Amino acid sequence: MSNSLNPNDVPSWDLTDLYQGLEDEKLEADLSSIVADAVAFEEEYKGQIAQPDLTAGLLVEAIQAYEQLLINQYRLQAFAQLTFTTDTTQPERGALLQRTREVSSQALTHMIFFDLELGQISNATFDQIIGDSRLAAYLYYLQYQRNLAKHRLSEEEEKIIEETANSGGRAFVRLFTEVTSQIVYPVDGEDLTQSQLLARFQDPDREKRQMAAKVLSEKLQGNAHVLTYIFNTLLHEKQVVDRLRDYNHPESSRHLSNDVDQSVVDTMVDVAINNLDIVSNYYQLKQRLLGIEELTHYDRYAPILDTQTQFTFTEAQEIIMQAFADFSPELAELTEPFFSRRWIDAEVKAGKQGGAYCMGVEPELHPYVFMNYNGSIRDVMTLAHELGHGVHDMFASQQTLLNYHPALPLCETASTFGEMLVFDKLEQTLTSAKDHLALLCRKTEDTFATVFRQIAMFRFEREAHQLRRKKGEQTLEAYGGLWQKTQQEMFGDALILGDEHQCWWLYIPHVYRTPFYVYAYAFGELLVLSLYAQYRKEGATFIPRYFDLLRAGGSDSPKNLVSAIGFDISDPDFWQSGCDLIRRRVDLAIELAGGIDS
């Protein structure tokens, strides 16, 4: 471990597996062929799918042609998105992103018929052909598309929605990204990015945390008009589309997309709310350990008994690789190329989008990991998290494209499991009770952020969408009031969110980009807590079943995939078991703190 981070250790990714650069002639050629290939697909298969004499052979042929069209589009979109997020200030990168979206939308207007016709296959014809072995790999996809059919519009209406999206919702999401990525946060004579500023909330110096909160609030307030307008517009667009598609609730389309029943999500949310005392119990302990009279929003991530040790990127790599290898050499083997082949972009720089993500493009291409590495232990955990996503994609690469991506509730399985492995590795290196407590507190706070904070954000989204639908366009203050209420309920009286926190919803990307995505984090964390407990109980015999879950990708519903490894997500006790494990961590922290005090 080091006291400072050497920026030369931090990698930028190599995208040449996609294209050589913005001037690559192949990029232009592929852009030019996307629409023509889609037109040819439409001419070949339109009108043939929803016929009584449809054969399994024809359907397989059409599905595989459809997959290839999507693969070609995904590669273009991935290159444009990956390039753009590393520097949102370059106009040519934004222009390429917009062009790929427009070309893809144009192509999709010639492909929309396919999913529509899948939903129109008669039950008699479907039942007759679905048992053919050639369709086995596509069974879940076909059944899923037929479930979506009742929410689809006519072909012409679907085309209009697709073609106007790039001047509607997608354009506003891009504007949100550009606005928030280009805000400069001046602190102590330095111009910080958002990621660098947010890292200040982990500083042991309370005055520095307070200053970071002040600067964040001032800059968000300065951009509040445009960000609130973007949010209002996106919520209204969703309201219109939901009405046209006959979804009963704002989150209904996300549940269907995730193939999870509303009742399952409601059960998980209710269980989490019933366990909010875990959060308040912990922050009462934190208040005592920090010796602060009243904790506030900028104390949430203040380190406890911590020297703020920094890890170089190389050190983070070594910790993660060893943790993964201890669990399984296969896991480490799949992870190693992310480092050696530069599949990671972790350098912090001006204009780079904040946050972190892993992009799995298609089964024949490796994933890409994006983050802003500042050297904190949270950054080590974030890197482990995104690499978990990456190995999940690597395991699932044996699937076809249409079964490659797991539903969002299972997307967080390998990522959160990877964090758990690294946490255990770090814990094994500690010898003092103080260091053990500091690490345990960090992990507990990260778990709170993944479970209870995401549930709070999900509730904020639900209330914000409902408010927008009932009373029309809302103000910054109206949304801020909902944000403050749903966030404050986590802490009870143990931590008080100050007034300036009321505008912090403005920088949360998921509520703009992917409505109701956030409950998938809580789902994944609570699932993994149960999986990890089973691993600790079983040992090596657990590993093959876990890897089978990852290899399954999106080839079945979350309920069925989780059931295959012995869990029932409709049972409140399943979710409670995860909360019980979190509670035991907090109880252990209280016990350790008592030993230190004495």
Image (tube, rainbow, N blue to C red):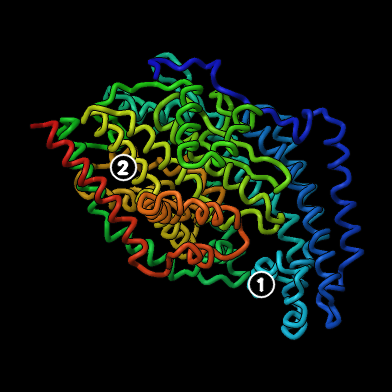
Question: Which residue shows up at 45% across the image and 37% down it?
Answer: 326
Q: Amino acid at mark 1?
A: Gln
Residue type, mark 2 in image: Thr
Residue 275: assigned label: none
Viewer-nearest residue: 94 or 4: 4
Q: Is residue 329 above or below residue 466?
A: above
Q: Which residue is mark 1?
A: 143
The percent coordinates of residue 117 (x first, y second) are 78, 72
Residue 94: x and y in percent read: 70, 34
Q: What residue is at 76 percent from the left and 43 percent from the top?
A: 100
Does residue 522 appear anywhere in the picture?
no
Q: Residues within 10 Å of mark 2 (few under 14, many from 20)?
A: some
Position of the N terminus by quadrant: top left
Mark 1–mark 2 Cα distance, whole angstroms, equals 40 Å
**Which one is nearer the viewer's eye here, 576 or 499?**
576
Furthest residue in direction bottom, as rendered: 124
Instruction: Check disc 2 and report its element: helix, strand or loop.
Output: helix
Which quadrant holds the C terminus? top left
Tell me the residue that label 2 is attached to: 444
Is 233 displayed left or right of 96 in the figure? left
Q: Secondary structure at mark 1?
A: helix
